Image (tube, rainbow, N blue to C red):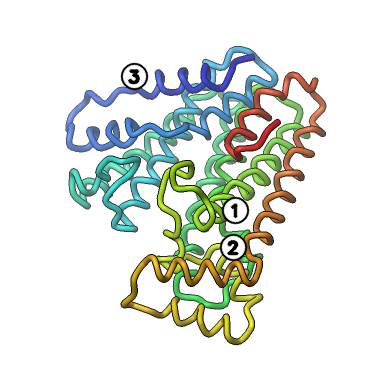
């Protein structure tokens, strides 16, 4: 069994040698730049881990792992453009360096490259791999559309939000595990359980991100808290607060949601205070714990030796800052 650092090293080495030398460099330089920004490479590592549960020759699916990471970075490139973001991982975003038109075109090229890499699999695996990948990428677009529509709605429900983050965040983690297991000829029941495990953990991971945006330590979290509050993002926290607020709390929340001239620290403090009064943080933590426990149970139910699943379990627990 390979460790998470060993798999990460394999992914990074493969991405670094991908061919971008062909002209025009104005198309390929932004792609190489976006992929060079790094990150934890969670999705390709998960794919290799799922494969490694059943087979040792993980290099055999590096094209698919790289394809998944290329697709993920394509979404980040276009998200930065849509959000007019200046920085990504402490470096300028592609559209700030090369311009918006170049970002659109290079992002499109990344999408094509991702599909090409995903297609480099044995013929007997091609149909199912491509079907799973296409479904996941379409669902991510659906999730992004829901997220955009939620920006102008005040009646978003918790169930709608959970479905949105399932589509936007969880499915790519889940399909990484699914494709990895399928490529390793895992039993169909295991393939589906690993997919379900990815969905549960993806939901828990996103809800934890929502929670930490309000209550996290900036030095540990890696960014300032309160960002979601300042941009009125419809998170589990805000949706729950709007649902549970009494008349006075609702009035104050709506004041801050509609305010256009305010001191950022005051808005964060006021909204956080309302969250504390309502107990939103505890609600979110309970939901996270439920999803996390359900996910681990799914993994435990897979008929493999416990020690065989340990690397995957430890990796996911580390993402959630949990002890195994």
Structural distance between the alpha carbons of marks 2 and 3: 40 Å
Structural distance between the alpha carbons of marks 2 and 1: 7 Å
Q: Give the image location of residue 161, x and y in percent.
A: 59, 63
Q: Are marks 1 and 3 in contact (CB under 8 Å)?
A: no
Secondary structure found at label 3? loop
Q: Give the image location of residue 183, x and y in percent.
A: 62, 25
Q: Nearer the viewer, residue 219 or 313?
A: 219
Tell me, yes or no, if residue 26 can be seen here: yes
Looking at the rendered structure, which numbered label has been put on residue 69?
Answer: none
Looking at the rendered structure, which numbered label has been put on residue 236?
Answer: 2
Considering only order in the chain, which callout, 3 or 1, is on the residue closer to the N terminus?
3
- Packing grade of label 1 (10 A; few <14, some 14-19, many >=20) is many
Secondary structure found at label 2? helix
User: Which quadrant would residue 262 be assigned to in this image?
Assistant: bottom left
Q: Nearer the viewer, residue 158 or 103?
A: 158
Secondary structure found at label 1? helix
Residue at screen point 33% across, 34% down: 37
Q: Are marks 2 and 1 in contact (CB under 8 Å)?
A: yes
- Packing grade of label 2 (10 A; few <14, some 14-19, many >=20) is many
Looking at the rendered structure, which numbered label has been put on residue 17?
Answer: 3
Residue at numbered disc 1: 207
Considering only order in the chain, which callout, 3 or 2, is on the residue closer to the N terminus?
3
Q: Is residue 18 above or below residue 299?
A: above
Tell whether 211 sits left or right of 262.
right
Q: Is residue 213 above or below residue 196?
A: below
């Amino acid at each position: 069994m390979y460790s998470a650092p060993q798999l990460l090293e394999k992914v990074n080495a493969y991405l670094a040698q991908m061919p971008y030398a062909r002209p025009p460099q104005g198309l390929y330089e932004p792609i190489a730049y976006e992929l060079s920004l790094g990150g934890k490479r969670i999705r390709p590592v998960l794919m290799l881990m799922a494969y490694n549960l059943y087979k040792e020759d993980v290099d055999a699916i590096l094209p698919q792992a790289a394809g998944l990471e290329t697709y993920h970075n394509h979404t980040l490139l276009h998200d930065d453009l849509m959000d007019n973001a200046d920085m990504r991982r402490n470096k300028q975003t592609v559209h700030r360096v090369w311009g918006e038109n170049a970002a659109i075109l290079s992002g499109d090229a990344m999408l094509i490259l991702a599909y090409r890499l995903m297609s480099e699999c044995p013929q007997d695996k091609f149909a199912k791999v491509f079907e799973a990948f296409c479904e996941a990428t379409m669902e991510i677009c659906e999730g992004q559309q829901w997220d955009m529509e939620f920006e102008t709605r005040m009646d978003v429900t918790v169930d709608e939000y959970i479905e949105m983050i399932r589509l936007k965040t969880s499915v790519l983690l889940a399909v990484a595990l699914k494709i990895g297991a399928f490529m390793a000829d895992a039993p169909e029941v295991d393939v589906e359980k690993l997919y379900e495990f990815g969905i549960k953990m993806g939901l828990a991971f996103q809800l934890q991100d929502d929670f930490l945006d309000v209550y996290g330590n900036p030095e540990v979290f890696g960014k300032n808290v309160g960002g979601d509050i300042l941009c009125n993002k419809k998170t589990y926290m805000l949706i729950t607060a709007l649902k549970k607020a009494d008349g006075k709390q609702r009035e104050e929340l709506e004041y801050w949601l509609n305010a256009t001239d305010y001191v950022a620290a005051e808005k964060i403090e006021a909204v956080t205070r309302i969250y504390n009064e309502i107990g939103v943080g505890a609600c979110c933590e309970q939901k996270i714990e439920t999803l996390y426990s359900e996910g681990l149970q799914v993994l435990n139910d897979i008929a493999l030796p416990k020690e065989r699943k340990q690397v995957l379990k430890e990796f996911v627990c580390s993402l959630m800052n949990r002890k195994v």
